[in-house]
Image (cartoon, coloured by chain):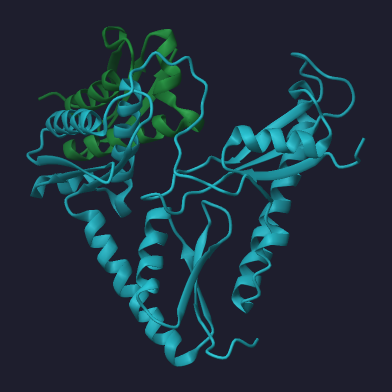
């Protein structure tokens, strides 16, 4: 299993569950170091607002969930939301 | 025109608070306002409690700006000074709590629309989402949580039940401990995400309680024991005890314990997220 697989699976699952256009979601895991990855999230334009949520609440929750996924793999995982 | 140019208003919803603030400032249109949401409203727990919205509304100086970035810097400054002020308020609050004098009313922002009901949010999003029954929502929550546990590659069981219109979701299994996190942070995140999923599917989301690996139950028990001990101490020594700031759910546990103990009264003070419970011994002869 490649590094960041669980992170990707978890982040992608969550994002697809909360957007209107799941087919437009892309999650790319980028290695930042030996034990660190960042999941880059892209969605359809209209969906980004929901993914981030009021005052970033949803984004914060996604980050916490991703970091728990990272722990399962013994790595640090961050999430970036890209337009 | 009044000479006040900043007010903080507390009300059941952000919308009502802004309306009230505009009246207070004598302003008729929103163009002339800077609105800062200090606290988002939180729904009550089982119809009890809940937090009002608090907004800070500042009158813009001089002419209306539209898209101009003129004095953004000075505005930032004003925001900051306002914040400091409210922090101070909060502190003096905490002190007054200790002496038992409940001056809450003077110091807290104006309370408008006080009669609060466990009513749903009144956001005016163009809503073509269906209204789902609580059972249907429970099913969506169940499916989402099962998929999530699977995405983590963990083994666990998800059950959902509906009680008094509240969805009670329980994720259990040894491995699901990984989804609790330090001080329940991951559990909190999953709770937020599950709610977001429910909101995507329908309007009028039911309340959701989520426990993972027995964390919420363990926390409830630990808090109850803690509250019992404090109350025992109060009964012996009298006076009041202020607890640390807690979430609405945690405060409810304390209030519930207090309500079972005769001669003990509990109430909450301060504004979220620093709202805290005060336990006090009721003096039998009602004198101060």
Chain coloured green in this rendering: A
Tell me the cyan chain: B
Residue at horizontal 53%, vertical 40%? Answer: B40
Q: Position of residue B20 (x, y in %)?
A: 71, 38
In this view, the residue in front, A64 or B255, is B255
Q: Which residue is drawn at 26% across and 33% down?
A: B134
**Left or right: B165 with respect to B29?**
left
Residue B161 falls in image quadrant = top left
- The C terminus of chain B appears in which quarter of the rendering? bottom right
Within the image, what quadrant is residue B207 found in?
A: top left
Residue A50 versus residue A3: which sits nearer the camera? A50
Q: Which residue is drawn at 38% across and 50% down?
A: B45
**Viewer-nearest residue: B247 or B109:** B109
Quarter of the image where the N terminus of chain B is located: top right
Q: Position of residue B240 (x, y in %)?
A: 53, 79
Relative vertical location of residue B240 with respect to residue B189 in this rendering, above or below: below
Residue B54 in picture, x, y percent from top left: 62, 43
Which percent across, then down, holds residue B283?
54, 87
Relative placement, left or right, of B13 versus B183 is right
**Quadrant in which residue A3 is drawn:** top left
């Amino acid at each position: 299993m490649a590094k960041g697989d669980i992170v990707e699976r978890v982040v992608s699952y969550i994002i697809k569950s909360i957007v209107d256009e799941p087919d437009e979601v892309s999650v790319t895991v980028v290695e930042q170091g030996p034990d660190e990855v960042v999941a880059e999230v892209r969605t359809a334009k209209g969906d980004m607002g929901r993914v981030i949520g009021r005052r970033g609440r949803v984004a914060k929750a996604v980050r916490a969930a991703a970091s728990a996924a990272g722990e399962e793999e013994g790595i640090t995982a961050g999430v970036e939301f890209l337009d | 025109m009044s000479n006040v140019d900043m007010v903080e208003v507390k009300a059941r919803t952000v919308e009502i608070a802004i309306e009230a603030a505009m009246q207070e400032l004598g302003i008729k249109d929103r163009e002339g306002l800077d609105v800062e949401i200090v606290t988002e409203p939180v729904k009550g727990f089982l119809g009890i409690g809940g937090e009002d919205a608090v907004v800070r509304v500042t009158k813009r100086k001089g002419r209306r700006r539209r898209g101009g970035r003129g004095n953004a810097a000075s505005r930032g400054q004003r925001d900051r000074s306002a914040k400091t002020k409210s922090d101070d308020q909060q502190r003096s609050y905490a002190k007054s709590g200790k002496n038992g004098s409940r001056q809450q009313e003077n110091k807290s922002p104006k309370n408008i629309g006080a009669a609060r009901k466990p009513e749903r949010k009144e956001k005016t999003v163009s809503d073509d989402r269906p209204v789902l029954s609580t059972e249907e929502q429970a099913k969506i929550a169940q499916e989402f949580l099962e998929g999530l546990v699977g995405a983590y590659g963990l083994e666990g069981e998800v059950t959902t039940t509906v009680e008094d219109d509240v969805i009670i979701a329980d994720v259990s299994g040894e491995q699901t401990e990984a989804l609790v996190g330090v001080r329940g942070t991951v559990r909190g995140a999953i709770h937020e995400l599950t709610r977001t999923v429910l909101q995507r599917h329908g309007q009028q989301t039911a309340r959701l309680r989520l426990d993972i690996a027995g964390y919420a139950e363990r926390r409830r028990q630990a808090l109850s024991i803690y509250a019992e001990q404090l109350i025992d101490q109060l009964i012996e020594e009298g006076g009041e005890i202020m607890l640390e700031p807690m979430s609405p759910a945690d405060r409810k546990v304390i209030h519930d314990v207090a309500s079972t103990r005769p001669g003990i009264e509990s109430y909450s003070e301060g504004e979220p997220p620093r709202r805290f419970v005060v336990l006090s011994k009721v003096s039998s002869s009602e004198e101060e």
